[in-house]
């Protein structure tokens, strides 16, 4: 009985009138949003990712004919119409969901801002503010993208892997480093030093890095960036 949001109706209509289904038959797994690592039952460590970039990729991939599964960290965005969306909180939960769905996919896009660290000794009880200083020990989370790239090699999977790199400086150097270190086929680098692009904004500006070279995509809405990224990498 509930009417779809007008934006969703327009998106569905776009799908009907857009015959270019260049991702038809492709299965795509996308991660989006932040992760949350609990400190105690009421506090957590997270980051400013809204999920907009990953959700835009999921919607555009579906419009282009792909079968999409979206694994999303905590985000205020509604699950996109017609896309299987799995909600998780922690990096470990995201890892478990990726492990469960990765085999049989054609493309993996890791747009999530996965927390690098989790709190080592999670407190079951709320921590009281009765000390002048409080020290939290953090330990590294598993690198989900690197794990997927390693499985691709191990099992000779027919899978294209795409990571993102959120950088505040030396974009090219760090993006190239991530390409090699994580073993991805593409790294999409975004400069997150400005407020109006990157984290929690409606627009983005990116550079695609691959072993073949680099390709900048000018500032635009995340929907347009997503569409251009998919065409550039997979058409
Ligand atoms: O969600 P929005 O508000 O729309 O913002 C979009 C975005 C800025 C979050 C997105 O475009 C982006 O850049 N996502 C990746 C952010 C990030 O965490 O980058 P990184 O440099 O820390 O990680 C590099 C890559 O490894 C990423 O693909 C990340 O998903 C992956 N990673 C990182 C750590 C980890 N433990 N596991 C991972 O899989």
Image (cartoon, helix red, strand yellow):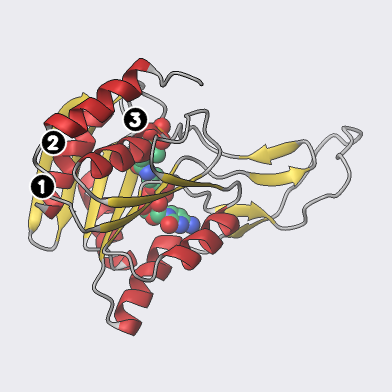
Q: Which residue is mark 2?
A: 217
Q: Which mark is residue 232?
A: 1
Q: Secondary structure at mark 3?
A: loop
Q: For the point 39% across and 61% down, which residue is it?
A: 145
Residue 204 placed where, x, y %?
Answer: 26, 29
Q: For the point 34% across and 24% down, which residue is it?
A: 8
Q: Residues within 10 Å of mark 1 (few under 14, many from 20)?
A: few
Q: Taking 169 as reference, is 2 left or right?
A: right
Mark 1 residue CB less than 8 A from any atom of ligand 1:
no
Q: For the point 30% across and 37% down, which residue is it?
A: 59
Q: Secondary structure at mark 2?
A: strand
Q: Residues within 10 Å of mark 2 (few under 14, many from 20)?
A: some
Q: Which residue is mark 3?
A: 193
Q: Are marks 1 and 2 in contact (CB under 8 Å)?
A: yes
Q: For the point 78% across and 36% down, which residue is it?
A: 42
How far is the residue under mark 1 from the one under mark 3? 25 Å
């Amino acid at each position: 009985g509930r009417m779809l949001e007008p934006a969703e109706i327009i998106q569905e209509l776009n799908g009907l009138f857009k015959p270019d289904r260049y991702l038809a038959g492709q299965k795509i797994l996308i991660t989006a949003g932040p992760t949350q690592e609990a400190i105690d039952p009421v506090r957590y460590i997270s980051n400013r990712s809204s999920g907009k970039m990953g959700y835009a990729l999921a919607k555009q991939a579906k419009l282009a004919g792909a079968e999409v599964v979206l694994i999303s960290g905590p985000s205020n965005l509604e699950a996109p119409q017609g896309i299987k969306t799995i909600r998780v909180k922690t990096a470990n939960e995201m890892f478990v969901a990726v492990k469960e769905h990765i085999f049989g996919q054609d493309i993996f896009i890791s747009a999530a801002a996965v927390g690098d660290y989790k709190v080592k000794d999670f407190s079951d009880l709320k921590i009281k503010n009765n000390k002048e200083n409080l020290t939290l020990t953090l330990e590294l989370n598993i690198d989900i993208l690197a794990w997927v790239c390693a499985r691709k090699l191990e099992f000779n999977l027919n899978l294209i892997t795409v990571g993102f790199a959120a950088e505040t400086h030396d974009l090219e150097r760090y993006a190239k480093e991530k390409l090699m270190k994580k073993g991805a086929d593409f790294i999409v680098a975004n400069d997150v030093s400005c407020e109006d692009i990157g984290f929690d904004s409606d627009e983005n500006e990116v550079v695609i890095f691959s072993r073949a070279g680099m390709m900048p995509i000018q500032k635009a809405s995340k929907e347009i960036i997503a569409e251009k990224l998919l065409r550039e990498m997979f058409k």
